[in-house]
Amino acid sequence: MGSRMASYVKSIDNKHLLEVGMEGFYGDSIPDRKQYNPGYQVGTDFISNNLIREIDFATIHAYPDSWLSKENDAAQMAFMQNWMTSHWKDSSTILKKPLVFAEFGKSKKDPAYSIYGRNSFMNAVYSSIYNLAHTGGTFAGGLVWQLVDEGMDSYCDGYEIVLPQDPSTSSIIIQQSYKMTALEHSLSTTLGTRS
């Protein structure tokens, strides 16, 4: 089904990139990878879904405060490091496609939530993304879930970030953007001198 739909979408529009948009749970295609799932399986398969030829890049999502709600921050961060590293390696070696961390965040609805905790979490995730991208791998960036503007309360799900209300978080996002842009220029220059 997935390959037919991807082919159909590309037949309509082959000028835009196509991705699956799933969380990244591992399935039966490589059973030993299931150890990286957050303790349950939802019927998707990161490897087989992203091996479809028409899929241009892979994505993952992660919500450890929801998926591992009984675990402390250290255990949730350890999960995140394993989650990111395993998908980065598989994107590079098996899929041979770029990887985007398309959704991550910390929910304000979590009883243990604090702005400091969210900022620490985001810094750690962004640092890992940068370091994995810097090593020349396939990590192409990361997007928080979700940025909303003031007055968009109907879209708020606990993970929302309202930049004018959260200047410290806004600063983290801006810094990551600058770092990834500088890395892109650095890698472009390096690759340009090799040709």
Image: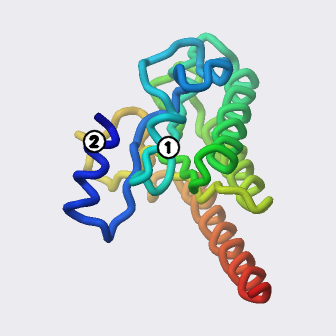
> Within the image, what quadrant is residue 177 found in?
bottom right
Q: Is residue 29 left or right of residue 194?
A: left
Tell me where residue 73 sits by quadrant.
top right
Q: Which quadrant of the structure image shows residue 106?
A: top right
Which one is nearer the viewer's eye here, 73 or 142?
A: 142
Q: Is residue 51 above or below residue 178?
A: above
Residue 20's disc number:
none
Which disc number belongs to residue 155? 2
Camera-side residue: 69 or 114? 69
Residue 113 x, y percent position in the rendering = 57, 28
Residue at image point 49% right, 43% down: 51
Residue under pointer 1:
51
Look at label 2 and name its amino acid: Tyr
Q: Nearer the viewer, residue 100 or 161?
A: 100
Q: Secondary structure at mark 1?
A: loop
Sequence-wise, the earlier of marks 2 and 1 is: 1
Q: How is the image coloured?
A: rainbow
